[in-house]
Amino acid sequence: MIRVLVLTDFSSGYGRNLLRGIVRYSQQVGGWTFYRMPLSYRMLHGDKGVVEWAKKWGADAIVAQLGDVDIKLLRDLKIPIIVQNYQDRISGVCNLTGDYIGTGRIAADFFLRKGYYNFAYYGITDTVWARERGEGFRLELEQRGYRAYQFLESSPMREAWNYDLESLGQWLLSLPKPVGLFACDDQFALQVSETCQIFSIRVPEEVSILGVDNDELLCNIASPQLSSIMLDVENGGYMAGHTLHQLIRKRIEAPYNISVGALQVVERQSTQKYVIEDPYILQTVAYIEQNYATRLSVNDLLERIPLSRRILEKRFKQNTGLTLYQFIQRYRIDHFARQLISTRRAVKDIAFSCGFDDCKNLSRVFCKFKQMTPSAYRRKYGVHRRGDTTQF
């Protein structure tokens, strides 16, 4: 029997998905048992309390969200430890970390594709994931000729998170509108949403909000519902379980980092707005979104817009940065990818429902956007990936 002590934030979607991935691995190999320790236990009893409990329970390994940690004290246990990053990455142990800068870049690209030219970031300074998400957001915008306004909180632990409502509200009021606002996670995105309600700031008309983690509870209790970047957390938990097993069996000796990647933006009402001043292009985009699943062609669009093909193509690219064909393909691929990893539907059925009638061409287009085939993408990221043998 392998005993694993798990010390994380079980109130968050991230923490629950992480544990789900670890448990999935344990069920495949069998013979594991878990003890869930809330973060408040360490806050009350410190590292010594965690070590004493791990010894008492006879833990074989620890997965823990730790900030300022006495690694020497934990090493005295002489058992494998995987640290879920909080304040910073910690040397000498396996870190469960992420491509935080890449996540920030995805957020910037998302708002740029919607035509925004005003941007803002809301986060905290005390955690590596928030710092680097903000940094990635800033870097991508600067490389594209833009800047982002920032409002940064400072707080030691998630349980103690609070925010200055008045200051946040005044900052939101001061931002040029419309603005694309990226929050370091869904908790912070929800705080922005609630503050906008109190200060009568319209979402998404004035402030478009994007969070991270795709915590469905937090995203859906917001009004309007929050868009968020989905992370591959469950697969990260699965890899953490596999790594622990290898360490326990002494198949590997040196610690290494496990990185959780970003999958895609799950769009809800809080970002359903394009900042396009040209009324014909805005009308074209709206029509594409409503009819992407049909056999949509440029000729269909020309029948509804009083512009020549050359003028429509030129003005469309000026406003969106993409050709009409590229925009339609990207929109279809985004919807296709989302269903691919969240449902058990056959790949061909999903393809047809997203407007693709040539499966061979779809595989080529999908590889261009995602750098892998649809079947490989589903195997790697799909929530229902077990037992999927669909080939493409």
Image (cartoon, grey):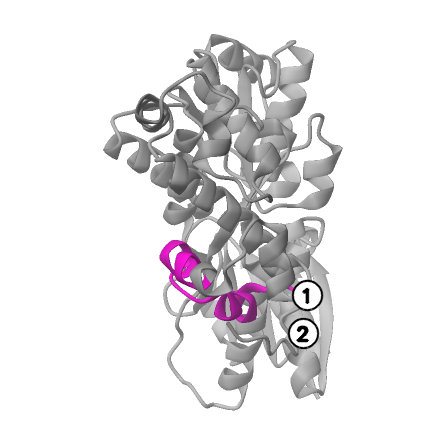
Residue under the point 68% across and 65% down: 20
**In magenta stretch: residue 372:** yes
Residue 352 against residue 189 in the figure, above or below = below
Residue 129 against residue 267 in the figure, above or below = below
Total numbered badges shown on the rendered structure: 2
- Residue 342 seen from this side: yes
Name the secondary structure under disc 1. Answer: helix
Query: Which label belongs to residue 20?
Result: 1
Comparing 104 with 342, the one in front is 342
Please identify the quarter of the rendering in which residue 93 is found: bottom left
Comparing 382 with 297, the one in front is 297
Distance (Cα) linking label 1 and label 2: 6 Å
* Residue 338 horizontal/vertical position (percent): 58, 52
Q: Amino acid at mark 2?
A: Arg
Magenta residues span 363-383
* Residue 320 horizontal/vertical position (percent): 38, 28
Name the secondary structure under disc 2. Answer: helix
Q: Is residue 124 left or right of residue 158?
A: left
Q: Amino acid at mark 1?
A: Arg
The residue identified by callout 2 is 24
Residue under the point 59% across and 77% down: 61
